[in-house]
Image: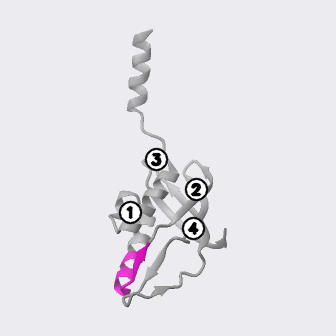
Amino acid sequence: MLLALLLVLLLTSCADPAADPQAALNRYAEIAERGGELSEVLTHSALIQARASSELMQSLGYTQRGRAKFEIWSASNSLISGCLDLSDLEIIDRQGAFLSAGQRRSAFIATITPDNQISQFEVSQERC
């Protein structure tokens, strides 16, 4: 009996952890806030788009202060939908002026890989 229990524990500890979409989205927000390496949590088209946005912000002399928040509405396999909340995020130009971010809450869809990376991320014009 004890051997069977140990075998089950060993097998479950070796299994790949299930993707945790909320953790991936929170990690993305954290890395974006501190200007870290986006490839830690993004891949494929999501990484390409995020790097392009980051390069544009840098070329314009803009900085970000604060963190985006994500609310998941539904998660089915690897497809996630929810609300992106930018209420706590500010964009500042070279002169230190705060820029209007426009719509603060928008619907999004994302695809999460089995290793908990965001491979696709799209924000819609739909408010939430």
- At label 4, the amino acid type is Asp
Instruction: Give the numbered dot on residue 85.
Output: 4
Q: Is residue 75 left or right of residue 88?
A: right
- At label 2, the amino acid type is Ile
Quarter holding residue 48: bottom left
Q: CA distance from mark 1 to mark 3?
A: 20 Å
Look at the image and tell me in which quarter the C terminus lies: bottom right
Q: CA distance from mark 3 to mark 2?
A: 13 Å
Residue furthest to the bottom: 95
- Mark 1–mark 2 contact, CB under 8 Å? no
Q: Position of residue 49 (x, y in %)?
A: 44, 71
* Residue at 40%, 67% in the rendered image: 32
Look at the image and tell me in which quarter the N terminus lies: top left
* Residue at 43%, 13% in the rendered image: 4
Bounds of the magenta segment: 54-65
Classify mark 3: helix, strand or loop: loop
Classify mark 4: helix, strand or loop: strand
**Chain-order first, disc 2 or disc 4:** 2
Q: CA distance from mark 4 to mark 1?
A: 16 Å
The residue that disc 2 covers is: 80
The residue that disc 1 covers is: 31
Whether residue 39 is in magenta: the answer is no
Residue 76 lies, with reference to residue 8, above or below; the image says below
Q: Residues within 10 Å of mark 2 (few under 14, many from 20)?
A: many
**Chain-order first, disc 1 or disc 3:** 1
Q: Residues within 10 Å of mark 4 (few under 14, many from 20)?
A: some
Q: Is residue 25 left or right of residue 72?
A: left
